[in-house]
Image (cartoon, rainbow, N blue to C red):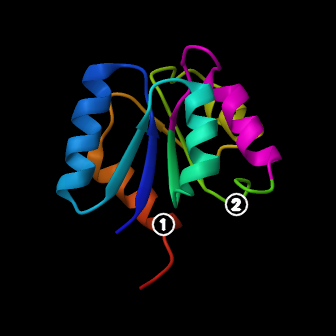
Amino acid sequence: MAKILLVEDNEMNRDMLSRRLVKRGHEVAIAVDGQEGVDMAASGKPEIILLDMSLPVMDGWTAAGHLKGDGATSAIPIIALTAHALAGDREKAMEAGCDDYDTKPVDLKRLLAKIEAFLPAS
């Protein structure tokens, strides 16, 4: 299973998603703002980052740019998580450096399929 960094400021979303991922065998580290997410990605080397786009301190758009601009973290796939499901948001997330995009509320089956698509075949 994967080592996942979940960057989410909403406690209810964070708790629900992390528990469901752990239940499926993933190891989950949690950051509560964009700057903490960038720092934890550099030190913790997750296999995948689930990145909320509306974050305090540093928003997800900026955090994605920092992560993709740093050689130490640029290869880590980022899945943007956002309640902003407006036209153009997917493109904006991809331009910011995200590798995929999913909307909230999270459809766990769909999100797990996206996570698995980024993991090396075992």
Q: Quadrant of the N terminus?
A: bottom left
Residue drawn at the location 42% of the way across and 59% of the way down? 3
Q: Which residue is mark 2?
A: 75
Q: Is residue 39 magenta?
A: no
Q: Which mark is residue 45?
A: none
Picture quadrant where residue 83 is located: top left
Cα–Cα span, label 2 and label 1: 15 Å
Picture quadrant where residue 105 is located: top left
Q: Is residue 99 visible?
A: no
Please tell me whether mark 2 sits on a helix, a strand or a loop. loop
Q: Is residue 50 above or below residue 110?
A: above
Estimate the x, y position of residue 120 in percent, counting from the top left.
51, 77
Q: Which mark is residue 117?
A: 1
Q: Is residue 12 above or below residue 70?
A: above
Residue drawn at the location 74% of the way across and 56% of the way down? 72
Picture quadrant where residue 12 is located: top left
Crowd class of label 2 (few under 14; some 14 to 19; many from 20; radius 10 Å): some
Query: Would residue 95 be found to the left or right of residue 40 on screen?
Result: right
Crowd class of label 1 (few under 14; some 14 to 19; many from 20; radius 10 Å): few
Residue type (three-letter) at the residue carrying disc 1: Ala
Quick one: 42 or 20, which is closer to the camera? 42
Query: Would residue 45 be found to the left or right of residue 30 on screen?
Result: right
Quick one: 9 or 107, which is closer to the camera? 9
Dot placed on the residue nearer the N-terminal end, 2 or 1: 2
Please tell me whether mark 1 sits on a helix, a strand or a loop. helix
Residue drawn at the location 71% of the way across and 43% of the way down? 67
Residue drawn at the location 42% of the way across and 65% of the way down? 116
Estimate the x, y position of residue 64 in percent, counting from the top left.
68, 37
Q: Please provide the residue range marked out in magenta.
A: 51-70
Query: Would residue 49 be found to the left or right of residue 15 on screen?
Result: right
Quick one: 58 or 88, which is closer to the camera? 58
